[in-house]
């Protein structure tokens, strides 16, 4: 299908007349959220816009240019409810895929059962939006987190070193090899504070989530999600049901770029081991 052969708008259906569920993938960097966005967007009745709060995102830049304001609750409300924004997004990604000679999956608004975004706790904090969930009790929240905070930190540092955020950016063999072979040094004198702050943030996220109705909250850890192909299949079924759509087979185009073995990633692993082994953070060495 090309841009010239987009399907005509389907007739009204039960999907069109039903209220569209709004969802939010609540997470932190290097927790597998690109995987979820990709899976959701493969479903014919789901749309997730990905990140919209970061100052590098196109919606943020456009909003700042028009309003001269930082993103606020009204900005997020508009993204969730605006058909204009929805179709601009659909045409933008259709055109991107057309240029890249990839399949175009254009979805009419009347097809959609749930629309959402993904964003990070620290970004919500930056823009004073930590009350967004409380102000929107009908929001369906997928909380994706990592149990091993040391591996999350190391993955983030590898990303900064290689400047490769996702596997979609590694289309050539050179970039793939560079990412897979990347190793970093971790400062033992700083890592204790890094992990202490990370655990403090986990508690802050839990304080926010404890006010969310259990029927509107789906928790999934990175470790459970990526334990096996079977666990990914189970999560897809669980997540699709959570959002009120029929489960379908879907395979994410996102791929792991680096090892989960800390010894493969950290040049001075021995120093790090000695710094952590007799502390409460020794559990993250596993």
Image (cartoon, rainbow, N blue to C red):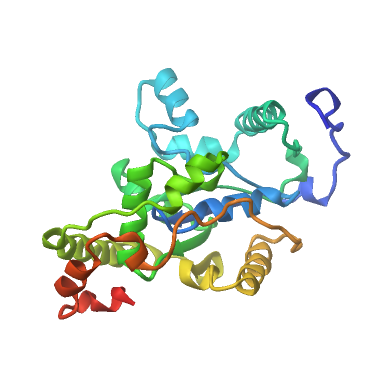
* View extreme (left): residue: 189
Name the image quarter holding residue 110: top right
Residue 19 visible in the displayed image:
no
- Residue for point 24% across, 77% down: 282
- Residue for point 53% across, 35% down: 78
In this image, 174 relative to 270: left or right? Answer: right
In this image, 38 relative to 175: left or right? Answer: right
| Frontmost residue, 170 versus 67 | 170
In this image, 16 relative to 148: left or right? Answer: right
- Residue for point 57% across, 55% down: 36
Relative to residue 86, is residue 254 depicted above or below? below
Residue 273 visible in the displayed image:
yes
Relative to residue 3, is residue 178 depicted above or below? below
**Image quarter in which the N terminus is found:** top right
* View extreme (top): residue: 66
Label total for image: 0
Q: Position of residue 155 (x, y in %)?
A: 37, 56
Q: Position of residue 208 (x, y in %)?
A: 36, 62
| Frontmost residue, 248 versus 167 | 167
| Frontmost residue, 99 versus 210 | 99
Q: Position of residue 194 (x, y in %)?
A: 20, 60
**Image quarter in which the C terminus is found:** bottom left
Q: Position of residue 252 (x, y in %)?
A: 64, 54
- Residue for point 26% across, 62% down: 198
């Amino acid at each position: 299908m090309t841009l010239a052969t987009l399907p005509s708008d389907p007739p009204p259906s039960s999907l069109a007349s039903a209220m569209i569920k709004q969802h939010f993938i609540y997470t932190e960097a290097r927790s597998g959220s690109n995987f979820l966005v990709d899976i959701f967007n493969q479903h014919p009745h789901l749309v997730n816009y990905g990140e919209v709060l970061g100052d590098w995102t196109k919606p943020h830049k456009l909003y700042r240019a028009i309003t001269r304001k930082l993103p606020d609750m009204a900005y997020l409300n508009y993204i969730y409810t605006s058909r204009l924004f929805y179709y601009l997004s659909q045409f933008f990604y259709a055109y991107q895929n057309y240029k890249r000679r990839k399949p175009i999956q254009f979805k009419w608004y009347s097809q959609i059962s749930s629309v959402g975004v993904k964003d990070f706790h620290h970004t919500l904090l930056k823009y004073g939006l930590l009350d967004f969930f409380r102000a929107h009790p009908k929001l369906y929240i997928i909380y994706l987190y990592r149990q091993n905070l040391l591996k999350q930190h190391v993955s983030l540092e590898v990303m900064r070193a290689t400047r490769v955020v996702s596997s979609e950016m590694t289309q050539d063999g050179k970039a793939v090899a560079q990412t897979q072979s990347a190793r970093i040094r971790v400062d033992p004198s700083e890592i204790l504070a890094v992990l202490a702050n990370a655990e403090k943030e986990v508690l802050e996220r839990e304080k926010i989530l404890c006010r969310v109705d259990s029927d509107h909250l789906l928790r999934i850890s990175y470790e459970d999600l990526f334990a096996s192909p079977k666990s990914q299949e189970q999560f897809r079924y669980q997540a699709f049901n959570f959002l009120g759509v029929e489960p379908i087979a879907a395979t994410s185009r996102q791929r792991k770029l680096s090892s989960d073995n800390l010894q493969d990633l950290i040049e001075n692993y021995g120093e790090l081991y000695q710094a952590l082994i007799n502390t409460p953070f020794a559990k993250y060495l596993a």
